[in-house]
Image: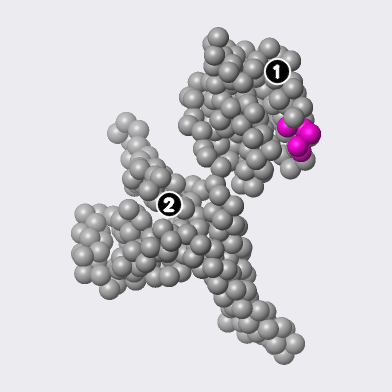
Amino acid sequence: MCNTVWVGVDLAKKSFYAALAPLGTRPDEWAKLHHRAFEHSAAGVTALCTWVEHGGYTREHIAGVCVEATGSLAWRFVELLEERLGPVSIVNPAYPHQFAKSMGLREKTDRTDACALALYGMALRPVPRALPSTRARSLRELADLYAAARSDLTATENKLGERITSDFVRKRLKTRRRQLQKELDAIEKEMDTLRAQDPQAVQDAERMQTIPGVGPKTARLLLAHLGDLRQYTRAELTARAGLYPRQHQSGTSVRKRPRLAKGGGAAIRAALYMAALNARRYCPHLRAFADRLKHNGLSNMAALGAVMRKLLL
């Protein structure tokens, strides 16, 4: 019989916990699931495959492997696994967390997280994700480094804007500002070098910059964080960036103003923010669009969020 079990894996830096959920298992039976801890290494992943096989499951019996999106930890695990247990679904951590709450789990341990992930995969069958290329992961790492350096530069500039008595502190801050600016320039140059290796990405960046308000920095960061935008539907793209309205109303007494869902796409929204400001100022079409939304009762920030969404789409 094929596709009879889901494997849930809760990842940590040095170890991971795995649980097996046979199809048909009820959520309230989570404590009965087979589980075990492993070392997060090539030997540990091999031990996981052996453990699953000794449990009576070959690859054809495994419906899928479900892990949380934990950045480089998740991709490292996928690389080590090499599809020996079949396709791996990397899911937003918020989804299995809410699923665990719906199961009535009051404790949070590696074991309960692994069991919840296995049951979440069994119940909802999340779509597997392909391992991104080395170039794509390098671009994402550079984008994260750029965001950290940019944050440090902003903090340094804000400090220089204050009244500083010490000449030594002022000189060190100015030196730090120059160093951070050089670092940002170097990161941008490296990102452009990597992007030049993919003619399609170069063409996409050029086409992006024909949109009012979108310049080289915005195009560079969006491509680094999102990759090829063709892989997303419109709904998936706005969800990835957190640029969709979240309603909050119940009955007749609770009726709050809709707000952006936000979530894990903070870097994408940061890249679009200045682009939306410039587009709203200099593009008549988008300025009229934002003004119409404000006239209909949306706040200034909500209208700007709608412009960000329109630019992204």
The boundaries of the magenta stretch are 41-45
Q: What element carries label 1?
A: helix
Name the residue beneath numbered marker 2.
Answer: 228
Dots 1 and 2: beta carbons under 8 Å? no
Left or right of 273? Residue 281 is left
Q: Is residue 149 magenta?
A: no
Quadrant position of the N terminus in the picture: top right
Which quadrant of the structure image shows residue 276? bottom left
List x then y, in percent, for residue 42.
75, 37
147 or 217, which lies in front? 217
Which quadrant of the structure image shows residue 96? top right
Q: Residue at point 56% right, 49% down?
A: 133
Left or right of 161? Residue 265 is left
271 or 171, which lies in front? 271
Magenta portion: prevailing SS class: helix
List x then y, in percent, for residue 224.
50, 58
Q: What element carries label 2?
A: loop
Q: Could you tell me the amino acid type at mark 1?
A: Glu
Name the residue beneath numbered marker 1.
Answer: 53
Q: How crowded is mark 2: few (under 14 residues within 10 Å), some or many (20 or more)?
A: some
Q: Distance between the residues labelled 1 and 2?
A: 37 Å
Q: Could you tell me the amino acid type at mark 2?
A: Asp
